[in-house]
Image: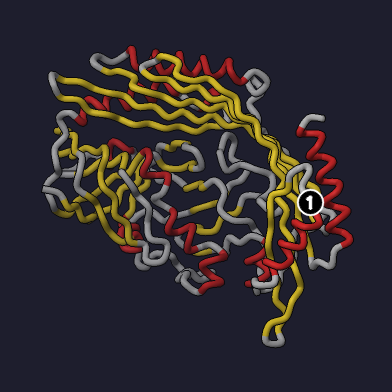
Amino acid sequence: MDQSRQNLELIDQLVLLLQQADLYGWELRRVRQSSDQLYLIFDEVESLRRVETDTVQVQIYLAQEKDGQPVLGESGWVAYPGDDLQAGLVQAQARAQWVANRPFTLPGPEQVYQPLATVDHTWHQQPQEVLWRVRADLNQGQAQLNNIRLASAEVFAEYREISLINHRGLKAEHQETELFVQFALLAQQGAEEAESLGYRRARFYQDLDLIEMVTRYGVYAQDSLRATLPPSGRYPVVFGEEALDTLFNYFSAQAGGTAHFQGWSRLKAGEPIILAPQGDLLTLSSDPWLPGGLASRPFDTQGLALQPVTFIKNNIFQQVLADKRYADYLKLAPTGNLTNLRVMPGTTPLAEMLNSDQVLHLLRFSTFEPNPVTGAISGEIRTGYLIDHGQVTPIKGGSVSGRLDEAFAQATLSQEVVQREAYYGPAGVRLENMSLAGA
């Protein structure tokens, strides 16, 4: 009997066992995944393999009391065919007794799920074919530049089936594909070499746009050979490309249910997120229906139906982003946590944002993650440019820092938009008076 049929029987056995147990609630989450993987060394195939997994995660909840108050014990385990399921349940119950969370209810069967296109039908039945197409794209992109070599690459073509059931009668299913490409390019000038690392994730092959990306990252590698450490000081900074993936994380974290329940969010409904703004006003939405978005899905990890939610509109905080647990804790309607971030663009052309006496255009950092509590941000520059009266100088090293709730008081958002993995919004975000520690 194959593993798929074994796991179907396993789920039937688990449901019967859990229904008979003295539990507050339970949920079963099954994830079937196939991953076709291609590894390249200087365009030579180092390895080609297929990895298949099929897992069943069990989560149980116990109704308990602590200091006279109702609390919820929680625990879980991964079940496999042939396991002693009764023993697994007893052990999970023993662990759950040491947990004392606030009670909440799981989503019920009343959920209505939005149909979404999250499977690339051009390749998911023949995943190795897309691996070779991606390899050809890598080579074509590299061939457009001189003195650039593809040092290595990893290409994954993955297909997932996710199913979820719980004690309330909820049943949810979802399928998705994902392509992951990571590559290293080497640029050489005499005895000097520089490396440029790139990665890309996409639902659909057509969204990879890999030839253009490899060519662009090859230019970054060449520019790195002549890049200098920028002079220290305060600059206007235009953030783009990889920096956009995390630039707004402070605001989404502050809007989250965890922050509001634990008391470290400063946002209040109906009040401005930025005091005395002088630039473009922020409008941010969580969009689980974004076509091609890597965070697009019909339901969250517990089966809650998802839909687009605008949580900041024209600088005013609208509502908390909370899954079912934290929504119950806060006595709010659940929205789900952040999915794809959609940012309303501005009206200023990107070229105009880069046209000033001195401006930094920063695209890639070693790390760039704002502090979710304070909004402080600091990142070591991997790829950037100092633009001074039209003269462009590649820079690397040094770090840019600031506090986002202050920096966004003078924000300019480009009219051009870009879609990245889980981001759709302005291609450039200009923040004034950022601190640069350099030469």
The residue lying at 52 percent from left, 72 percent from top is 262
Quarter of the image for the N terminus: give it: top right
Name the image quarter holding residue 406: bottom left
Query: Does 243 sit left or right of 267 as displayed?
Result: left
Identify which residue, 408 or 210, lies in the foreground: 210
The answer to which image quadrant residue 42 occupies is: top left
Is residue 143 toward the left or the right of residue 60 in the image? left
The residue drawn where x is 77% and y is 34% is 4
For label 1, the crowd category at 10 Å Cα-Cα, with few meaning under 14, some 14 to 19 and many 20 or more, is few
Residue located beneath label 1 in the image? 84
Q: What kind of residue is marked 1?
A: Asp
Q: Position of residue 33 (x, y in %)?
A: 65, 34
Secondary structure of residue under mark 1: loop
Residue 411: x and y in percent read 33, 53
Quadrant location of residue 144?
A: top left
Q: Is residue 406 above or below residue 50?
A: below
Q: Is residue 360 visible?
A: yes
Query: Looking at the image, is 134 positioned above or below residue 164?
Result: above
Q: Position of residue 267 (x, y in %)?
A: 48, 69
Image spot of residue 395 (x, y percent): 19, 38
